[in-house]
Amino acid sequence: MEFFAISLLNGVSYGLLLFMLSAGLTLIFSMMGVLNFAHASFYMLGAYLAFQVSEWTNFWVAFLIAPALVAVLGGLFERVVLRKTHKFGHVAELLVTFGLSFVILELVQLIWGRVPVDYKVPVALEGSLFKLYNSSFPAYRAFMMLVAFAMLGGLFLVLKKTRIGLVIQAALTHPETTEALGHNVPRVFAVVFAGGCALAGLAGVIGGNAFITEPGMAQAVGAIIFVVVVVGGMGSLAGALIASLLIGVGQTFAVGLDWSFIGGLQTLGIQVTPETFGYPVWKLKISQVAPILPYLLLVVMLVVRPKGIMGTRDE
């Protein structure tokens, strides 16, 4: 019971961090049809900028400033580069964001070096929030969950209850009509792209010190957020939330399970020996294959339901 409760809490907190990352990518794709390959790089940039600002001031100032800085940089990229590339089609957009990810990586390594930086959890959030059985749940993980829920609520309010949210939704489905009504659709696109980058930056601010802030952090999460977006459904925020929690909880439980396929087969009365065909596979433990489970889920989803859990788009 202790393993289940702690793994569930850790899995939900990790899943919500994935959602914070994938939400921005989902917004950008649903609005602009652009799969931003540099999205995870903006996550990394948020972590490094938060580290630098916190060195000069403190974590709480960095918590506010770093996502704003990432939003400004994302908006500038959309205005100066991506908008001019749009007329050449989606392949050109993919390639230019792919190139941007390497530019950001090299700049990060030039400025902060190739080794991890000492980006610490704020003193006020150190230690455990509560004890469950014999295990402690860190206060900072609870803070991460709170920020993710606040972001989810904020997105819902902005998209459903405000004028700019209605304009964004209108521009998504009827861009020509929206522009004919006097709205600046390119500016709306820039705001959406900058907002998506800001969400990635915010995830970096709270994820960078929870895990590790180093140049490989974008590569570590880059693939998994695309899995989340595809499994949840391209362009669906609700689907991204479901997929994030599914992958976060599932992977967390899998990492903690010491079961092997041999044990399962023996339970069914099937004896497995070193001479049995495929023995190297049968002897693997679930914890060993945990890293590939999200990608197996991706393959299954693409075969069974290519649109994803709640996807509506065919692109």
Image (spheres, helix red, strand yellow):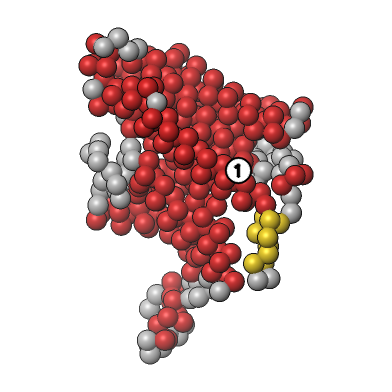
Secondary structure at badge 1 equals helix
Check the image and report above or below for 76 versus 311.
above
Front one among 277 and 297: 297
Q: Residue at x 26, y 46 (%)?
A: 307
Check the image and report above or below for 258 versus 179.
below
> Residue 210, image x and y in percent?
65, 47
Q: Residue at x 46, y 82 (%)?
A: 263
Q: Residue at x 71, y 40 (%)?
A: 119
Front one among 88 and 65: 65
> Residue 92, image x and y in percent?
35, 24
Check the image and report above or below for 125 versus 183.
below
Locate the N terminus by quadrant. bottom right
**146 relative to 271 in the view: left or right:** right
> Residue 189, image x and y in percent?
38, 20
Give the class, few, some or many, for how many residues have Cα within 10 Å of label 1's Cα (few <14, many ≥20). many
Can residue 297 be seen at all in this image of the molecule? yes
Given the image, on which type of amino acid does mark 1 rest?
Gly
Tell which residue pokes out farthest to the front in this image: 161
Locate the C terminus by quadrant. top left
